[in-house]
């Protein structure tokens, strides 16, 4: 059924807000809906006739929350239930003191970067010690100056920190495959392997299945994914795609044909 204009004795086709095009233009020229104040006491927000309450109070009434707009509503669950919960720890020891001193430092510097003089909203630890939050050890900086101060401080490989060598160095020293070392690391056996490479490594069945799945290219083609990518001069991420389309077999077939002729 075709919608029609809500004006009495007007059978024109519906356009918007319950009116046909002709009556809608008149509705807009008159200023649209009539306006009034929100029905909540001491609220001076203006709303249209279509609504009884302003946007803030409408939401609070719907959710049965406090009608005081100065009280902040925290959306989402708190603590362990929240999806972003990380155990309640921060990379900064005594994080509360750092946040408190940051506000004080921003007030002292009037929100200006102490290096370039432009607007700044970050703080930098002068002695690069994340646990020293004293006011004399903090300076206010902008994002650009903060980046310059930390430039060249690239984080070491976690394997270098834990085992004294990177995964690439392990492959060059002991042989095996990259995925094998990742697997030993997840099982907590990598440190044992480095100190005594010939130990009887008891890897769980599920982990072995995962290792087999990762290293299936070794079984089929005699080379792992990374070696295949070097031979085919392509990215290792494209090897699974080439495997599904049969391009790796074609590559080796061409190689054999060249050797024969």
Image: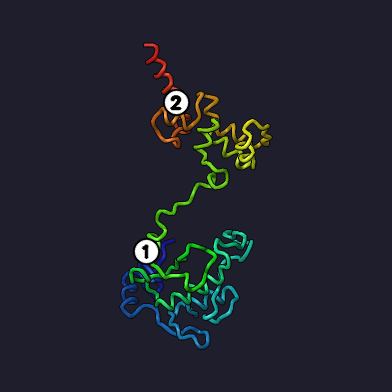
Q: Position of residue 113 (x, y in %)?
A: 37, 70
Q: Tell me if label 2 and label 1 are in contact, CB under 8 Å.
A: no
Residue 15 vertical position relative to residue 69 in the rendered view, above or below: above
Task: Please name whichever residue, 232 or 171, is drawn nearer the observer in this view of the structure.
Answer: 171
Residue at 50% from the left image edge and 33% from the top image edge? 172
* Snapshot colouring: rainbow
Q: Position of residue 68 (x, y in %)?
A: 55, 82
Count every numbered label the image shows and give the total: 2
Residue at 34% from the left image edge and 73% from the top image edge? 24
Q: Please give left or right for residue 3 compared with residue 177 in the image.
A: left
CA separation in Å, label 2 and label 1: 49 Å
Task: Please name whichever residue, 180 or 18, is drawn nearer the observer in this view of the structure.
Answer: 180
Q: Position of residue 5 (x, y in %)?
A: 39, 70
Q: Residue 191 has which mark?
A: none
Please give the residue where the numbered disc 1 appears in the rendered image: 145
Residue 93 vertical position relative to residue 34 in the rendered view, above or below: above
Q: Nearer the N terminus, badge 2 or badge 1? A: 1
Please identify the quarter of the rendering in which residue 201 is found: top right
Task: Tell me the element at label 1.
Answer: helix
Please give the residue where the numbered disc 2 appears in the rendered image: 248
Quarter placement of the N terminus: bottom left
Please state which of the two labelled residues, at mark 2 or mark 1, is closer to the viewer. 1
């Amino acid at each position: 059924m075709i919608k029609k204009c809500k004006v009495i004795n007007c059978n024109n086709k519906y356009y918007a807000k319950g009116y046909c095009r002709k009556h809608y233009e008149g509705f807009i020229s008159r200023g649209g809906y009539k306006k009034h104040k929100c029905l909540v006491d001491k609220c001076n927000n203006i709303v249209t006739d279509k609504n009884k309450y302003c946007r803030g109070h409408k939401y609070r009434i719907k959710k049965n929350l406090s009608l005081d707009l100065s009280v902040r509503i925290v959306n989402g669950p708190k603590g362990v239930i929240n999806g972003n919960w990380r155990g309640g720890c921060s990379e900064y020891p005594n994080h509360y003191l750092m946040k408190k001193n940051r506000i004080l430092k921003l007030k002292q510097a009037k929100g200006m970067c102490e290096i370039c003089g432009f607007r700044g909203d970050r703080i930098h630890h002068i002695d690069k010690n994340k646990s020293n939050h004293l006011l004399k050890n903090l300076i206010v900086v902008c994002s650009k100056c903060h980046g310059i101060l930390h430039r060249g401080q690239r984080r070491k490989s976690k394997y270098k920190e834990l085992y004294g060598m990177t995964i690439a160095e392990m492959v060059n020293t002991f042989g095996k495959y990259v995925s094998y070392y990742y697997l030993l690391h997840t099982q907590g056996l990598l440190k044992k392997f480095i100190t005594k490479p010939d130990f009887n490594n008891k890897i769980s069945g599920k982990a072995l299945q995962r290792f087999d799945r990762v290293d299936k290219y070794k079984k089929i083609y005699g080379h792992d994914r990374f070696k295949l990518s070097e031979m085919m001069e392509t990215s290792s991420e494209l090897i699974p795609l080439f495997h599904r389309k049969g391009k790796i077999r074609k590559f080796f077939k061409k190689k054999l044909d060249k050797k024969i002729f």
